[in-house]
Every structure is written in C-alpha cells, then in structure tokens.
Image: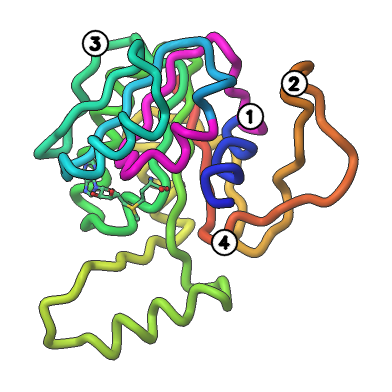
Amino acid sequence: MVGRLEKLLLVYAGLRRDDFLLDIGCGSGRLAVQLADWLEGAYLGTDVVQTLLDQAVRACNRPDWRFHKVSGLTVPADSGSVDMACAFSVFTHLRHEETYEYMRDIHRVLKPGGRLVFSFLEFRVPLLWQVMEGNIGSIGQDAVLNQFMSTDAVEVFAQHLGFELSEVHRGDDPFIPQFDPSTGSKIDGELYSFGQSVATYRKP
Ligand SMILES: C[S@@+](CC[C@H](N)C(=O)[O-])C[C@H]1O[C@@H](n2cnc3c(N)ncnc32)[C@H](O)[C@@H]1O
C-alpha cells in the first residue's frame, strides 16, 4: 500500500512515463515495484544498505534500472539529468544540516523544471505525535533518529537552495487522487492522505 501511494503521489506531482526518476533511500523497492510495469524512463534508486538494494533489484526485475549504494549526501548522477527526485521517509532520519546538503546535490542533478518530492515529520499532525512520544521514550538510548521538520524550514531551505516551493500538504490532508494508469487522467473518487507531510520543490 505504501509503495502504491508513493506512486500515486508522484503521478500527482507530474511524473510522466518517460521521465528519469531518482528515488533517494529507495530501501527494498516498495516504490520501484509499483513503478516497474509503468515507468518506461530511467530509474536510479540509492540507499546506504546493500541488502535492501539487492532486495529491490530482485523485486522489480528491471535490468535497465540502476540501484546504487551511497555512503554520504551526494547523488551518483550527472548534473541536470533527472526529471523528478523523491525521498520518502529519508530526511526524517537525517539532521537538518544533512538534509540541506542532500537537497543541494539533488538540485544539481535535476533538470531545469525538475521536481523534488519529499516527506517529512511535522509536529502539527496529530497522527505523527506518537513518533515524538517514541523519541521522548528513547532519550538517552542509541535510537534511530526521527527528525521533525517544520514548514518554515521547508520554505527557507527552498529559498536558500534556489528551489521554488510548489506545494506542501499536511500528513492528514487527503489530496492524492487515483489515476487511470493507461491514460494518466484522474479518477473521481476517494482522495488519500500520505501520513507524513509532503512538499514538492521545483528547480526553476
Ligand atoms: C524509512 S526507509 C524508507 C524507504 C523507502 N523510501 C520507502 O518509502 O519504502 C528510509 C531509507 O533511507 C535509507 N537511507 C538512510 N540514509 C540515507 C542516505 N544518506 N542516502 C540514501 N539512503 C539513505 C535507509 O537505509 C532506508 O532504506
């Protein structure tokens, strides 16, 4: 379900079938699997964990797609080559300064007009408060970082990096429509919320 929702969100954000998609922190390929029969363009999935990348390669069976292990905050892609980049629940595990530096390199690889779609943890979304409570409960332990990010940081990062902020949606805002996979047109019906808040940046 998560990968399907991620796909719908990217189509909503303007992903086209022949685009080059960069999936930062692709994990075991939840999104890639959903796109494997639909996306005709190039795909680059990156992650810091090789075993997850191996699972993703096996799961989506697209020998033409690339999966790369990365170790820092850079993207192994040429400047100005990517149509759309996404980072789902990735910046949530990085410090703000690291997210900012990652975004700088994502800006580099995007084409003019290219987009970055990312999810983030936001204090004002009641559903996400349980993550905050988990953080509080693990103070003093060597726990995974669950980094919250306020909308003002989302706005200011965009300004400093030279992105336009196209859209921001709270995690509990139902805004994601369904699409007819063959025509790409919206289907009337239920709109979905994403859970984490979502922002879309555009490189002018
Ligand atoms: C919560 S998982 C989300 C996975 C995937 N995006 C999804 O929605 O199913 C976060 C992923 O980010 C990866 N990750 C963490 N730091 C990273 C970094 N600096 N660069 C790329 N991936 C990273 C983790 O290994 C993990 O697979």
Q: Position of residue 53 (x, y in %)?
A: 25, 37
Which residue occupies the foreground of this view, 82 or 48?
Answer: 48
Pointer 1: residues within 10 angstroms few (<14), some, or many (20+)?
many
Q: Position of residue 84 (x, y in %)?
A: 46, 23
* Residue 19 within the segment the image draws in magenta: yes
Find numbered disc 2 in the image and state the secondary structure of the residue it sits on: loop
Q: Secondary structure at mark 4?
A: loop
The residue positioned 70% from the left and 45% from the top of the image is: 176
Q: Dots 2 and 1: beta carbons under 8 Å?
A: yes
Foreground disc of the pair 4, 2:
2
The three-letter amino acid code for the residue at tag 2 is Gly
**Label 1 to label 4: alpha-carbon separation:** 17 Å
- Which amino acid, mark 1? Val
Tell me the magenta residue range. 11-34
Residue shown at 43%/56% (left/top)? 120
Left or right relative to 31: residue 29: left
Above or below, comparing residue 38 to residue 6 in the picture: above
C-alpha distance separating marks 3 and 4: 32 Å
Q: Compare marks 3 and 2 and give the one earlier in the sequence.
A: 3
